[in-house]
Amino acid sequence: MSSFEGSEIIYHPQKRRKSLSLRFDQSENVFHFYYPDFISRAYLLKFLMDKQKWMEKVRKTNAGKIILKIEDLPPRNEIFQFFKQRLDEISLESGLNYRKLRLRKMKSRWGSCSADNEITLNTLTFLLPANLRDFILYHELCHTKIKNHSIKFYELLRKHVPEERKRNRELKDYILT
Ligand SMILES: [Zn+2]
């Protein structure tokens, strides 16, 4: 690993590769640079110089965010028990009924709700603060009534979670791995 203008880069010269590719790994906070092994150092530097602005932007977006990691999770059945109980409480209180709860590891979403009202939660949701966990449960429960993210959906969600916009912003401080 070495540093290029303040960004950590891991270099991956590859034998049969034809193109150059620079990817950012959020969870490690490093860039991975893949390129054909015959390419000259000058060319690589030129490529990185051209990517400078983009790299700076990516680093800034990632700064100060909290990374949720699978390793930090308790046993799965504990997580399931916890969410099942909380979801039932909120369901009872709000009058929004779901059919079934499932847990899954997902890379890009907190949860989902199927056409037949089966709620799937990202296992990593467990690591969020309590108010954000509840927020996600309310969000998915509201999908039992409205399947899309229309204005009507957010109106319904705000009825149950008035500080919906604030919660959505807070969620952006967390990164899924
Ligand atoms: Zn949704």
Image: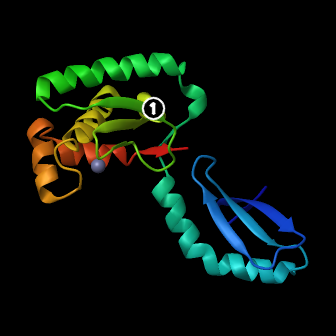
Q: In which quarter of the image is the C terminus?
A: top right
> Which of the pair 60/125 is nearer the observer?
125
Asked if one can make out residue 5 in the rendered structure from this viewpoint, the answer is: no
Q: In which quarter of the image is the N terminus?
A: bottom right
* 34 sits to left or right of 145: right
Corner quadrant of residue 23: bottom right
Disc 1 residue crowd, few under 14, some 14–19, many 20+, Cα 10 Å: some
In what element is the residue under mark 1?
A: strand
Asked if one can make out residue 63 in the rendered structure from this viewpoint, the answer is: yes
* 84 sits to left or right of 60: left
Q: Where is residue 8 in the image (x, y as percent from the top left)?
A: 69, 57
**Above-or-below relation of 55 to 29:** below
Q: How many labels does the image show?
A: 1
Colour basis: rainbow
Q: Residue furthest front?
A: 116
Q: Residue at x 67, y 69 (%)?
A: 22
Q: Position of residue 75 (x, y in %)?
A: 55, 18
Corner quadrant of residue 94: top left
> Which of the pair 53/122 is nearer the observer?
122
Corner quadrant of residue 82: top left
Disc 1 within 8 angstroms of ligand 1 (CB):
no
Q: Residue at x 59, y 46 (%)?
A: 27
Task: Say which amino acid is labelled 1.
Answer: Leu
Tell me the residue that label 1 is attached to.
Answer: 103
Q: Where is residue 118 in the image (x, y as percent from the top left)?
A: 33, 37
Q: Position of residue 26 (x, y in %)?
A: 57, 52
Q: Residue at x 37, y 49 (%)?
A: 172
